[in-house]
């Protein structure tokens, strides 16, 4: 089968489109004929081996030769212990919790990581939802659903997680402020953001306004600056960020939360089909939609990663496999 592999950390130039052996499912796995996949920030970090934390399990060379966690496709075969799926089922899911390998014609994954794809939804849309939408959902309700009327700020709102977070926060009844580059702001308003902010012209941590909840997808500011933008009982959740900011959050976040009324923490992503199915219901009801920026064929994954790394995307960058 065809796949995109890499043997060492580095730039998109390390990605090679080549022939590899087709995998075989274990007892609790299904073999998926992949139709579409999407790139996430985690893929980008694993490609570069940075921040260093992503090298756990593969310090000198990548643990997984094939990247890609968000996938959608058709079940071709099942392991002898699989109960939820049969050959011919269309599925989607985030397979980062059990394996990687989505940038290939076939991949094996645990049945627990997968959900059934509605017939009227495209494979591309399905592959856009699993990781980014689940991260947005888990981040926003880390301490329970946001109450109606609360002020929510999303920093880095123009990417995959952010575009879903805007829609979900509005479903919760929140007043949403979206922060990102100027050219992305019209799209963020169209998704439902009540207010938008060009981060190059305004600093949300110094403008004097405070928020009930901050979802930080970028993690590019000191947590002490972000703390200033929270109201007296506000919550701050970091979804992604630079290594210094992640370590800062891991050390000072619990301390800030312990000694005061503000809560600050780092989201620990938990891939699961329960959250996927909840999002699927919202998706089928037309309450959320994936935002797809560009699509590339499997043979051009390197080009797709180069575009992803430029930071100019709005929403998701997709890979068409079939």
Image: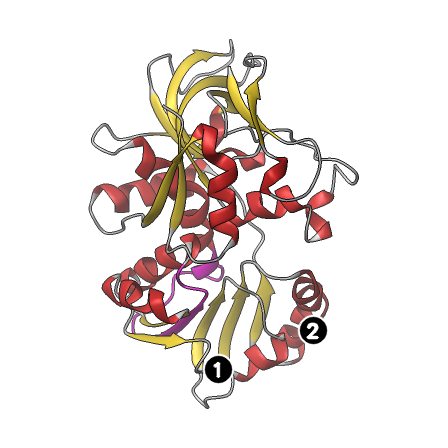
Asked whether, in this view, residue 96 is left or right of residue 168, the answer is right
The percent position of residue 275, horizontal first and vertical second, equals 41, 43
Find out whether residue 49 is within the magenta segment: no
Residue 203 is marked as 1
Q: Nearer the viewer, residue 297 or 53?
A: 297
Residue 276 makes an appearance in the image: no
Find out whether residue 144 is within the magenta segment: yes
Residue occupying image coordinates x 64% and y 32%: 6
In what element is the residue under mark 2? helix
The magenta stretch spans which residues?
Answer: 139-158
Residue 14 is marked as none
Asked whether, in this view, residue 269 is left or right of residue 294, the answer is right
Q: On screen, 66 above or below 75?
A: below
Residue 255 is marked as 2
The percent position of residue 69, horizontal first and vertical second, equals 51, 36
Q: In which quarter of the view is residue 294 placed?
A: top left
Residue occupying image coordinates x 48% and y 29%: 112
Figure coloring? secondary structure
Q: On screen, 157 above or below 36?
A: below
């Amino acid at each position: 089968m065809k796949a995109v592999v890499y043997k060492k950390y580095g730039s998109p130039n390390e990605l090679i489109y080549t022939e590899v052996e087709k995998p075989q499912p274990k007892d609790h796995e299904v073999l998926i004929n992949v139709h579409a996949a999407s790139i996430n920030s985690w893929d980008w970090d694993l490609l570069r081996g940075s921040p260093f934390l992503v090298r756990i399990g593969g310090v000198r060379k990548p643990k997984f030769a094939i990247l890609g966690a968000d996938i959608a496709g058709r079940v071709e075969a099942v392991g002898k212990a699989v109960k939820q799926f049969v050959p011919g089922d269309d599925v989607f899911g985030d397979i980062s919790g059990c394996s990687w390998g989505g940038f290939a014609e076939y991949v094996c994954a645990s049945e627990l990581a997968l959900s059934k794809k509605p017939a009227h939804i495209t494979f591309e849309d399905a592959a856009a939802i699993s990781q980014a939408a689940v991260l947005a959902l888990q981040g926003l309700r880390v301490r329970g659903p946001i109450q109606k009327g609360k002020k929510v700020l999303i920093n880095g709102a123009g990417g995959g997680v952010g575009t879903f977070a805007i829609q979900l926060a509005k479903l919760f009844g929140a007043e949403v402020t979206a922060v990102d580059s100027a050219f992305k702001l019209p799209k963020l308003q169209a998704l439902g953001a009540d207010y938008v902010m060009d981060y190059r012209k305004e600093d949300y941590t110094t403008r004097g306004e405070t928020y009930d909840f901050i979802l930080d997808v970028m993690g590019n500011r000191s947590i002490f600056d972000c703390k200033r933008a929270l109201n007296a009982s506000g919550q701050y959740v970091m979804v992604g960020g630079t290594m210094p900011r992640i370590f800062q959050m891991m050390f000072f976040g619990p301390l800030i939360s312990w000694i005061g009324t503000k809560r600050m923490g780092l989201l620990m992503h938990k891939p699961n089909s329960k959250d996927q199915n909840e999002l699927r219901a919202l998706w089928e009801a037309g309450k959320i939609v994936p935002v797809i920026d560009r699509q590339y064929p499997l043979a051009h994954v390197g080009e797709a990663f180069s575009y992803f790394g430029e930071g100019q995307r709005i929403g998701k960058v997709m890979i068409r496999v079939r």
